[in-house]
Image: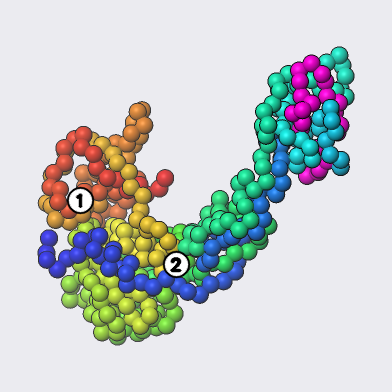
Amino acid sequence: MSSNWLSLDEALSQALNAVAPLRETEHVNVFEASNRVLAQDVIASCDVPPWDNSAMDGYAVNLNACNTDTPLEIQGVITAGMEARTPLAQGKAFKIMTGAPLPPNADAVVMIENTAQRDGDDKKVYIDVPPKSGENIRRRANDIAKGDRLIQQGTRLNAEHLMLIASQGTDSVAVYRKLKVGIVATGSELAAPGTVRGSNQIFESNRVGLHSILGEQNVSIVDFGIVEDDEASLKQLFTEASTKVDIMVSSGGVSVGDADYVKDIIDTLGTIDFWKIAVKPGKPFALGKIGETMFCGLPGNPVSSFVTAKLLVLPIIKRMQGELGSTAPLTLNATITCDIKRRAGRRDFQRATMTKTPQGTWEVTPFKSQSSGVMTSITSANCFMVIREDISSLSKGDIVEVMPFHL
């Protein structure tokens, strides 16, 4: 590995340290808050449950009157959403449904399976198995007490968070504003899908890939289209983008070809923090800044663009959105099904398929062709098999790290 290449860990650390999380917030309805990042702690405004209630369908009783010989008169029925009009009387029981408030003077609930009605008398109930004190009762605030912190600021909200918020009677929540992300593809050789391709052109695919990968983070995407390899046009584009978006993600033009102008233009307009990382595929990745706008320059090769977007752009965006905690992708361990030899020095993200064994463990098989020009290796794969920088060979049966595309 060249001495001026950063390891993936070093590059990611520098990138995350270089970005500033958003500060602007807004209130949105809970029905619109999915996948947004929480801007302030959610504090419980009420107890859950709000009162002692029955955990079972059965009979609310007082232990002093419970024995297996003497029936209890059924004083009434309490269903969820109603409450007893009078306290439980001595020698009586309330028939009660799950979730219904416990009547005053009751100190246990007997599940219906432990009771019986005899001689056709539906006004009395026998207790076959006497309960213990507090049995089958959910106490007030057993789940949540007023004043508890329910969800921490910086949490990315999903269904369970939103259900918890709604259970407090809250219909809106404070979140950070949506991040504005610009995407552009550079290269005179590119034609937009749906247009007529020139004889020396290929159809451009990176923007739609970026739109899908980054769009999953609930950002606002500004598509700047395709820009030819022309210094003046590219300079105008990036100058305009720096006034409109929080982060600009480009593909192409960051390598060392005669027409690769992007990196130098960003360096002129702002700064380039680093260029070239020790990963395969995806070595020519550039991080920089134009004014207050972050810049990520991805390789033009579609597979390399896909890999670096997953490994570097996604964590940067999550940090900018204010998300707390690890931004690293989920990884699992799997057993490799073949031998591999390779040149050490870069962390290799090989396209592979992972399958579950009957024993519940994972096996992984890398594709024979790992060319970064073979896009079908992404669509046919369901994971990256990760080979660390210092490893030059693997044997069948070795344990390796895998990064699933979807779970």
| Quarter of the image that includes the C terminus | top left
Residue at the image position 38 percent from the left and 80 percent from the top: 292
Q: Which residues are magenta?
A: 59-84
The amino acid at mark 2 is Gln
Asked which quadrant contains residue 32, the reply is bottom right
Per the image, is 36 magenta?
A: no
Most extreme residue toward the top is 119
Of residues 376 and 107, the one drawn nearer to the viewer in this rendering: 107
Q: Position of residue 186 (x, y in %)?
A: 31, 73
| Quarter of the image that includes the N terminus | bottom left
Residue at the image position 30 percent from the left and 61 percent from the top: 308
Residue at the image position 82 percent from the left and 18 percent from the top: 70
- Tag 2's secondary structure? loop
Residue at the image position 21 percent from the left and 58 percent from the top: 279
The amino acid at mark 1 is Arg
Q: How many angstroms separate mark 2 from mark 1 (CA)?
A: 29 Å
> What residue does disc 1 label?
388
- Upstream in sequence: badge 2 or badge 1: 2
Asked whether the viewer can see residue 193, the reply is: no
Above or below — where is 378 with respect to 18? above
Q: Position of residue 144 (x, y in %)?
A: 61, 50
> What residue does disc 2 label?
321
Asked which quadrant contains residue 197, the reply is bottom left
Asked whether the viewer can see residue 104, the reply is: yes
Per the image, is 63 magenta?
A: yes
- Tag 1's secondary structure? loop
Q: Position of residue 103 (x, y in %)?
A: 79, 39
Of residues 109 and 34, the one drawn nearer to the viewer in this rendering: 109
